[in-house]
Image: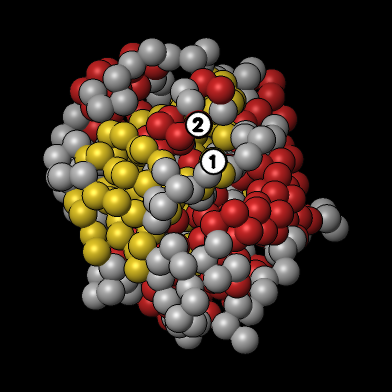
Amino acid sequence: MNTTPRLKNKNILISGAGVAGPALAYWLHRHGFTPTIVERAPGVRDGGYAVDFRGEAHLTMLDRMGVLDDIRRERTNMGAMTYVNEAGKKLSSMPADVFSGDLEILRGDLGRILYEHTRDHVEYIFDDSITALTEDAQGVQVTFERGGPRRFDLVVGADGLHSNVRALAFGPESRFVKEMGLYCAIFTTANHLGLDHTGQIYNTPGKLVGMYSARGNTEAKATFYFGSSPLSYDRRDTERQKKILAEAFAGVGWETPRLLDAMWEARDFYFDSISQVHMDSWSAGRVTLLGDAAYCASPLSGMGTGLAMIGAYVLAGELAAAGGDHRAGFASYEEAMREYAAGCQKSGDGVGKWMVPESRFMAWFINQNYKLLPYVPWKGLIAKGIRQTANAIALKDYER
């Protein structure tokens, strides 16, 4: 453990208790810093889609963190995903390693594991958020929506695509968020199809509906993707978001009507645009950004969670290596992560056209390709290419 007495800027506020924030807090504490996490939600968030880890870099990071075995115990063990027609008849399938990587877990389960590994040595402030940041030569004065003001040495925004910290320190998200022409929704529902560690996908021009089993087949996740120009809605107005989804998928076949009926009772409904974040710099003075707040790669890349946790490992390590000097630590963090983050973002480019085909011909063409996939000599190249992207970083051992 790096607990050198010369370590400065030890008190660090992290905004966001999803995945990136707790992962960073774990490593900061291990290096001798004192992290605090503030989270808008009243507790650890449940629900969400399945996330995956791929290749040696991801698994090495999880092993060094001491959470690899816990994640393996909670893994989804998903098999191939089946594309079906309106009547539910199988058209084609995609192998598990394309969708699930080497290790897949529900996002809510991952968040709980990270919280359990950090709650004893990290201060968590739930049901609150940052409203203002005032920086001076000695630190940052932070104003909260509910709690009284406090001072911290450094502030990290690990608060997702619509980062509050990024807006306060860098400006409006319209400058940094690039929408990709798709919206997605996900929620938990009953496994009424009796899916056994697998899922089914139905697509029609401009739309995709999917359902896959979760938590030992005791429940299922319903997923929706649809193409659209930018939509205007309140991100906290869940009922309005559900209405948008219901209108977008009105008249769509397969299991869509039943899933939409179940949506109205879903307590973990999630709705957002498919977007990426591009910034010239991830740091401004004593404030820096991590994960989706800085370099969201979009769910289409299959890299977001692994990228965020690798970023947390590197940010904490580089800050420790710099003795807490934020200028040097933030700069080396960005230098180490820039190319890797760009590669992960690139892996999501163009995926939307394959997931949500724009025409019936394109849907037919894609299904024909999937049918032939098990028989062609390059069948493993898709998963191999994704894994190579995930592995395109050499992890330092910061504790040596």
Residue depicted at 83% across the width and 55% down the height: 378
Residue depicted at 74% across the width and 61% down the height: 392
Q: Are marks 2 and 1 in contact (CB under 8 Å)?
A: yes
Name the residue that disc number 1 marks. Answer: 284
> 75 and 139: which one is in front?
139
Look at the image and tell me in which quarter the C terminus lies.
Answer: bottom right
Number of marks in the rendered image? 2
**Disc 1 marks which amino acid?**
Ala
x, y percentage for residue 169? 45, 34
x, y percentage for residue 73? 38, 76
Name the residue that disc number 2 marks. Answer: 170
Under circle 2, the secondary element is: helix
Measured along the vertical axis of the image, is residue 203 above or below residue 191? above
Label 2: how many Cα within 10 Å (few below 14, some 14–19, many 20+) = some
> 271 and 364: which one is in front?
271
* Residue 107 location, quadrant: bottom left
* Residue 349 location, quadrant: top right
Measured along the vertical axis of the image, is residue 394 above or below residue 179? below
Mark 2 to mark 1 CA distance (whole Å): 7 Å
**Disc 2 marks which amino acid?**
Phe
Residue depicted at 42% across the width and 43% down the height: 136
x, y percentage for residue 351? 66, 36
Q: Is residue 43 left or right of residue 82?
A: left
> 307 and 396: which one is in front?
396
Q: Is residue 110 left or right of residue 179?
A: left
Label 1: how many Cα within 10 Å (few below 14, some 14–19, many 20+) = few
Residue pushed farthest front? 137
Q: How is the image coloured?
A: secondary structure
Residue 354 seen from this side: no
